[in-house]
Image (spheres, rainbow, N blue to C red):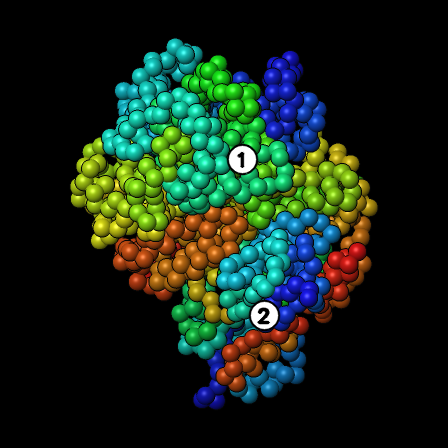
């Protein structure tokens, strides 16, 4: 083991910033992070063992105790559930002889749930040793169980199990055609870097992650910083359940994304860029590395790019299962080899980002658009969209529709148009912008996708009238509790309390006061949390309470109070041990029920 | 003209680089806090010091004071919500005050008293947490840890060591000790370290020092934390 | 006697320490007796409470009988008060919440040192233990909380006189203690 670990550390130049990448390799090899490895790494990287342990215990894909040789994770997104995930999961567990969260006795396989893997258009989905599995059904599961029981290496598994489709159904300004490799850089150098920033400014491009900060302003702020060591980061930690557009952009438009990053580097004066790729997209890694190599060979990365004097290169860093790393300052912490805990702001990343240096963090789609704008000019982009939301938005559409996949629309498109295009009928509501966004009902289909109405990072999940909205609320609320980084009190404790409270109501133990308590708790978590995760964690509840109060109320009992735990269930152990079967050995859940 | 901010209508001066908390303390205004100690880098995690700055909630301990800010602190809404945040800290751990040596000297308790917190409001978590009594002079009771990281910072910034860290995620976050065994006895922690004395609750206690002052005669039994904080922590600000 | 305020008290999973502290109001008890009469309470011999104004509950909920008693109080008392640390957060008895009930019972009645005639007690008259001890606000709705282990006599006095004299009960800083 010693030699193996030393080798990995050496390949990573003993850099503590590469801790995640190092641990990913150790986890892949041993299927856990052995204590001895932690001790050795602590010495090799000259960092305290506590830093390594805190990273291992922070990210979902790292483990201090052994997982199976085949680490099987099934995506727990609401869209997977809508495609029958639960029954399939039970079937799989049964077939393999291993329960959720456990390792089979022979150590061959472990099984667990994982947050949305970004395959909502082709689920139910999963991961085996980090590689995406799509379109799981019984035959696929039979096959997987067979392969695991035969202990077949992954590279001998049939490729159709891992097949990922792009599913682009509607393309527009950006997806219609890719720019030619190098075209954006050539235009930018020809036009002049300052003028190019001006074009981006004129284009009105705003960040595509959802928050909508103006890209040109961010770049300009960063370029004006005193410190000359600066960084460009592409946020491909697409973790919002229901979002998968970056997966498609990086599969089929990566060259243009990298070009956008390089244009950004020229503007701000960065020598180093990073693509922070969510761990769930491991399957894209080799392909992306190949594209980077090709760009280096073609003089589009490396030193003196296109003879312009610009030196810039891009490194791909993989995440390890943490939604919070989509938050830009948490992402930077993660890039530095630490747990993804959002920083205090100010200072903002443009002033003090990666290693304390000025850093621009943008979404994949933002860089894609920036490259196209560098070629086609600002007006080309600004002529489309609305007054405050220029250009187009790429949507990831999933849930109840005939054609789940990728759709590009000019900003300002109505929900109704989108629903018609993807073949959605009998719509009850749409989750716009993912769990952290807004749930709209079928009374609001004329609302528009735009920063000024419904802002979205791209997630668009459709629910037809056969769905119980509370199932989605339940799933999203559990998701946030699982993904809370735990830094601040309101989010750490509040998301767990929200989970308990929504469980109580969904399971039919709620009473009149519970809705008031729920709403009060939502406001507390929303108003006092440290970062966007906590500030939006209550949105699934708040936006549905506003629209479907009756639905919540129908789950309540007509009593003023009911315990939040199962009273009779809490007597079960004592009853069994005392061998009691009489009536007085039971408790009714509420007083009004006859005792 | 020196720069000023307004806290609850009172105009107070500040110096460039000060946070709202720094400025408030210097002016003799107490803003409730648990994870903050003026000697150490602000952390901003407990969120008790949340104030409304120009209508927006900010942590006073990390947010820079800027000329003309209108800060609200002692509003009914903020006081009620601070009480609820304190209640959150109580229910996520196991805070059995009657059985804790820190009682009466405990800042978590004192903030609860200050905010007139009479109950827990939320359902209790009763988490399963460890007690580490391995160290000859110091004991670590995770049941009482509120994850403020003051011990982490004190060890790094004052003791020049690295005894503690926070590990885990979400509600499973916990304090860890820097030793291969994970035990306090195998760290380089000394009873004289600042880290052994800084815990606002009874999570880290120095052994053989308990009950020297009887319950009922301790710091917060008769003095409110606002007064204590301004008397002791304000001095440290001046250093 | 007609218009006296009826007060009921009980101790669930508690130690009666709160009741003892209540009695520490000493001679003020006489003053109280002029306006208050006690219904079900360890201080009286009344077995069940009927139509009370105030119910004072000491201790948390650890078994099925506690649940029945607590519900009887909730049903019959206009105002229900959680008195003391155990009623508010489970207190000392809640220390067992970290040990599975099965282990607790085995240790106490089967495998523990000095156990004779090992057997889990089983009788229809015996209440069954809940898996965990719960504060009373998790089982019924509670109107007021008096913290302390125990709350001091002055806390009882202040709270009851506030209520009796028609003020919203409040505790000043000196009277708020969790220990």
Kind of element beneath mark 1: helix
Q: Measured along the vertical axis of the image, is residue B133 above or below residue B7?
A: above
> Dot 1 falls on which chain?
A
Residue A475 visible in the picture? no
Kind of element beneath mark 2: loop
The location of residue C55, given as percent across then percent down, is 49, 72
Between the C-alphas of marks 2 and 1, the distance is 42 Å
The location of residue B104, given as percent across then percent down, is 70, 62
Image quadrant holding the C terminus of chain A, namely: bottom left
The location of residue A259, given as percent across then percent down, is 44, 26
Residue B8 is labelled as 2
Residue corresponding to mark 1 = A268
Residue A373 visible in the picture? yes
Residue at 69% from the left image edge and 22% from the top image edge: A44
- Residue A302's image quarter? top right
> Dot 2 falls on which chain?
B
Q: In this view, does A65 lie to the left or right of A44?
A: left
Discs 2 and 1 share one subunit: no
Residue at 69% from the left image edge and 31% from the top image edge: A48
Q: Residues within 10 Å of mark 2 (few under 14, many from 20)?
A: some
Residue at 44% from the left image edge and 73% from the top image edge: C77
Q: Nearer the viewer, residue A444 or A387?
A: A387
Image quadrant holding the N terminus of chain A, namely: top right
Q: In this view, does A155 lie to the left or right of A384?
A: right
């Amino acid at each position: 083991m010693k030699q193996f670990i030393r080798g990995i550390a050496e390949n990573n130049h003993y850099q503590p910033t590469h801790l995640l990448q190092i641990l990913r390799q150790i986890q892949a090899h041993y299927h856990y992070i052995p204590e001895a490895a932690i001790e050795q790494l602590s010495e090799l990287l000259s960092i305290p063992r506590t830093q390594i342990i805190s990273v291992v215990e922070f990210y979902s894909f790292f483990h201090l105790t052994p997982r199976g040789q085949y680490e099987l994770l099934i995506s727990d997104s609401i869209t997977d559930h809508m495609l029958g995930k639960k029954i399939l999961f039970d079937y799989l567990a049964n077939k393999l002889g291993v329960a959720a969260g456990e390792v089979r006795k022979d150590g061959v396989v472990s099984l667990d749930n994982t947050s949305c893997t970004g395959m909502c258009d082709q689920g139910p989905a999963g991961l085996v040793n980090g590689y995406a599995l799509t379109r799981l059904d019984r035959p696929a599961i039979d096959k997987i169980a067979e392969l695991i029981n035969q202990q077949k290496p992954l590279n001998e598994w049939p490729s159709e199990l891992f097949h990922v489709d792009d599913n682009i159904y509607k393309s527009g300004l950006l997806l219609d055609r890719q720019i030619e490799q190098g075209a954006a850089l050539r235009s930018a150098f020809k036009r002049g870097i300052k003028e190019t920033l001006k074009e981006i400014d004129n284009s009105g491009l705003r960040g595509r992650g959802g928050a909508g900060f103006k890209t040109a302003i961010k770049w300009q702020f960063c370029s004006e910083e005193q410190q000359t060591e600066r960084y460009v980061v592409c946020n491909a930690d697409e973790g919002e359940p229901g979002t998968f557009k970056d997966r498609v952009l990086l599969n089929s438009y990566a060259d243009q994304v990298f070009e956008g990053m390089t244009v950004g580097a020229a503007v701000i004066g960065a020598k180093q860029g990073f693509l922070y790729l969510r761990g769930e997209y491991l399957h894209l890694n080799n392909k992306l590395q190949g594209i980077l190599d090709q760009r280096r060979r073609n003089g589009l990365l490396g030193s003196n790019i296109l003879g312009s004097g610009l030196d810039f290169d891009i490194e791909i860093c993989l995440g390890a299962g943490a939604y919070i790393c989509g938050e830009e300052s948490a992402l930077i912490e993660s890039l530095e080899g630490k747990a993804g805990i959002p920083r205090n702001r100010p200072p903002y990343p443009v002033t003090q980002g990666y290693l304390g240096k000025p850093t621009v963090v943008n979404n994949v789609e933002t860089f894609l658009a920036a490259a196209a704008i560098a070629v086609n000019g600002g007006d080309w982009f600004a002529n489309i969209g609305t007054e405050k939301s220029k250009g187009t938005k790429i949507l990831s559409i999933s849930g109840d529709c005939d054609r789940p996949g990728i759709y590009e629309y000019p900003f300002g498109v109505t929900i109704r148009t989108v629903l018609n295009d993807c073949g959605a009928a009998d719509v009850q509501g749409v989750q716009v912008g993912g769990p952290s966004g807004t749930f709209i009902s079928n009374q609001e289909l004329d609302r528009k996708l735009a920063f000024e109405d419904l802002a979205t990072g791209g997630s668009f999940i459709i629910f037809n009238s056969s769905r119980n909205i509370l199932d989605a609320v339940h799933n999203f609320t559990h998701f946030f509790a699982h993904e809370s980084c735990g830094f601040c009190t309101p989010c750490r404790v509040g998301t767990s309390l929200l989970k308990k409270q929504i469980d109580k109501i969904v399971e039919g133990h709620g009473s009149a006061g519970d809705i008031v308590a729920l709403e009060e708790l939502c406001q507390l978590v929303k108003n006092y949390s440290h970062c966007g995760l906590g500030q939006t964690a209550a949105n699934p509840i708040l936006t549905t309470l506003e629209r479907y109060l009756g639905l919540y109320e129908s789950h309540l009992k007509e009593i003023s109070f009911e315990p939040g735990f199962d009273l009779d269930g809490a007597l079960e152990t004592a009853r069994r041990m005392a061998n009691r079967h009489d009536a007085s050995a039971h408790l009714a859940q509420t007083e009004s029920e006859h005792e | 003209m020196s720069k000023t901010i307004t806290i609850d209508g009172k105009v107070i001066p500040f110096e460039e680089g000060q946070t709202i908390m720094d400025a408030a303390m210097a002016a003799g205004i107490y803003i409730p806090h648990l994870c903050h100690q003026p000697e150490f880098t602000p952390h901003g995690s407990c969120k008790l010091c949340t104030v409304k700055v120009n209508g927006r909630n900010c942590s006073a301990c990390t947010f820079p004071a800027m000329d003309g800010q209108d800060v609200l602190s002692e509003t009914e809404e903020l006081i009620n919500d601070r009480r609820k945040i304190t209640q959150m800290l109580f229910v996520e751990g196991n805070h059995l005050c009657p059985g804790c040596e820190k009682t009466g000297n405990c800042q978590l308790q004192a903030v609860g008293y200050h905010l007139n917190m009479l109950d827990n409001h939320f359902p209790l978590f009763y988490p399963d947490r460890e007690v580490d009594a391995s160290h000859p002079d110091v004991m670590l009771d995770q049941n009482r840890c509120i994850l403020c990281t003051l011990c982490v910072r004190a060890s790094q910034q004052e003791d020049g060591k690295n005894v503690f860290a926070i590990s885990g995620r979400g509600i499973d976050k916990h304090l860890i000790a820097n030793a291969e065994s994970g035990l306090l006895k195998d760290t380089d922690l000394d009873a004289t370290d600042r880290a052994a004395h800084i815990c606002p609750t009874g999570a880290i206690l120095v052994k053989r020092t308990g009950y020297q002052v009887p319950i009922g005669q301790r710091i917060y039994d008769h003095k409110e934390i606002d007064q204590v904080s301004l008397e002791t922590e304000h001095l440290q600000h001046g250093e | 006697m007609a218009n006296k305020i009826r007060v009921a008290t009980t101790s669930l999973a508690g130690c009666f320490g709160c009741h003892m502290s209540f009695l520490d109001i000493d001679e003020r008890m006489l003053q109280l007796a002029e306006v208050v009469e006690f219904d079900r309470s360890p201080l009286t011999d009344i077995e069940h409470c009927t139509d009370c104004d105030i119910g004072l509950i000491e201790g948390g909920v650890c078994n099925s009988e506690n649940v029945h008693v607590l519900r009887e109080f909730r049903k019959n008392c206009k105002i229900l008060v959680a008195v003391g640390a155990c009623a508010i957060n489970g207190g000392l008895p809640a220390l067992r919440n970290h040990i599975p009930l099965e282990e607790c019972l085995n240790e106490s009645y089967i495998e523990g040192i000095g156990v004779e005639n090992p057997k889990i007690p089983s009788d229809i008259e015996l209440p069954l233990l809940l898996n965990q001890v719960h504060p009373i606000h998790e089982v019924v709705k509670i109107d007021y909380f008096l913290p302390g282990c125990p709350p001091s006599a002055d806390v009882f006095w202040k709270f009851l006189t506030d209520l009796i004299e028609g003020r919203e009960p409040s505790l000043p800083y000196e009277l708020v203690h969790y220990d």
